[in-house]
Amino acid sequence: MPPPPRGLTPHPRRPADPGASAERLRSAGGPVLRFAPSPNGRLHLGHAYSALLNAQFAIRLGGLCRLRIEDIDPARSKPDFIDGIVSDLAWLGLSYPEPVRRQSRYMDAYRTALDGLVGRGLAYPCFCSRGQIRARIASAGEFPCDPDGVPLYPGTCRHESPVSVADRLARGDPHTWRLDMAAALRGAGSTLGYVAFDEAGERWIAADPGRWGDTVIARRDVPTSYHLAVVHDDAAEGITHVVRGRDLEAATDLHVLLQALLGLPTPRYHHHPLLHDAEGEKLSKSRGSQSLADLRQAGQTPGDIRARLGFA
Ligand code: GLU
């Protein structure tokens, strides 16, 4: 397990109660972190590690850590999972300032951000079904993939005529919204990158968002995607330091681009290693990894979990 973070400069104004003074700290310019789970399952050890690491960095930096519920997916987000997240974190001994932001309540704000990008010609509607995209890619033979291994969108709807787009939108044809990556890169202009921090200190990382291609920034069912909502909310909540898993490291390049386009500040980032199960696979809800609730049921204590994750 990684050692506790060292080499970071503690914030000079460390509050006596980091959990209780979000607004004061934000106005004082203090560090603000966040733990941002999606309520589509119960938390597992990987989440516990991320939440504890966020709390540890918050203490060392003299800041605070907020909780955000990333529930933009209406089909997968369940109120029971939100309750489970809150009770699992409390059981672990973690508390968070109120109010806890729930993304599903901010759809109008995401729509406004999206409209701004569309109005500047940086995003376009995509009417393609998954099957159509697959067929197009298959017919083209080789196609480059994004960092998640998904073939890049071939750009079909980017070439749709304005009249046809207007017709289809007026008809209510289902569509996502895609970033026009070439236009976005031109629009963002200057060199893109971010400051990464870890135990050893800070360093500059150059971002290469182009490798995501014309990625979806708003889904069919809601006027946002994870990417748009997360950059919007990190700015809205005054987040200065993002601590999250390495599975999102490549997405940070895209986030830096969206921040530049939307005129939002770029936080500092730390991407922590992911926990793996006995078969060497990343812990995940979809693999049915043992939840904290299961471990608690089996008699494990919060102290056992902390010790197992290296936070004793
Ligand atoms: N909601 C995301 C998840 O549960 C995390 C997003 C983030 O930390 O940026 O994987």
Image: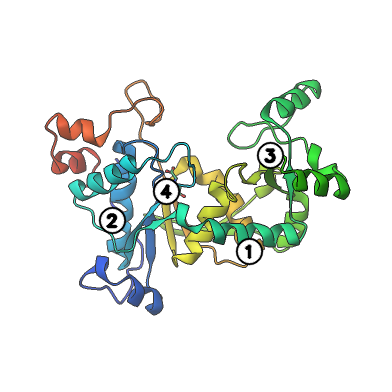
Secondary structure under badge 1? helix
Quadrant including the N terminus: top left
- Would you call the spot at circle 1 few (<14 residues within 10 Å), some (14-19), or many (20 or more)? some
Instruction: Give the numbered dot on residue 262.
Output: 1
Q: Which residue is mark 3?
A: 174
**Image marks 4 and 3: residues in contact by CB distance under 8 Å:** no
Q: Amino acid at mark 2?
A: Gln
Q: Amino acid at mark 4?
A: Arg
| Residue 217 against residue 234 in the figure, above or below | above
Whether label 4 lies within 8 Å of ligand 1 gets the answer: yes
Q: Amino acid at mark 1?
A: Leu
Q: Is residue 303 visible?
A: yes
Image-based side of 101 in relation to 106, left or right: left
- Would you call the spot at circle 3 few (<14 residues within 10 Å), some (14-19), or many (20 or more)? some
Gap in angstroms between the C-alphas marked 1 and 2: 31 Å
Q: Image quarter for residue 44?
A: top left
Instruction: Give the numbered dot on residue 244.
Output: 4
Secondary structure under badge 4? strand
Q: Earlier in the sequence, mark 1 or mark 2?
A: 2
| Residue 86 against residue 128 in the figure, above or below | below
Image-based side of 20 in relation to 226, left or right: left
Image-based side of 107 in relation to 3, left or right: right
Gap in angstroms between the C-alphas marked 1 and 3: 25 Å
Q: Amino acid at mark 3?
A: Pro
- Would you call the spot at circle 4 few (<14 residues within 10 Å), some (14-19), or many (20 or more)? many
Residue 222 position, x and y percent, is 57, 47
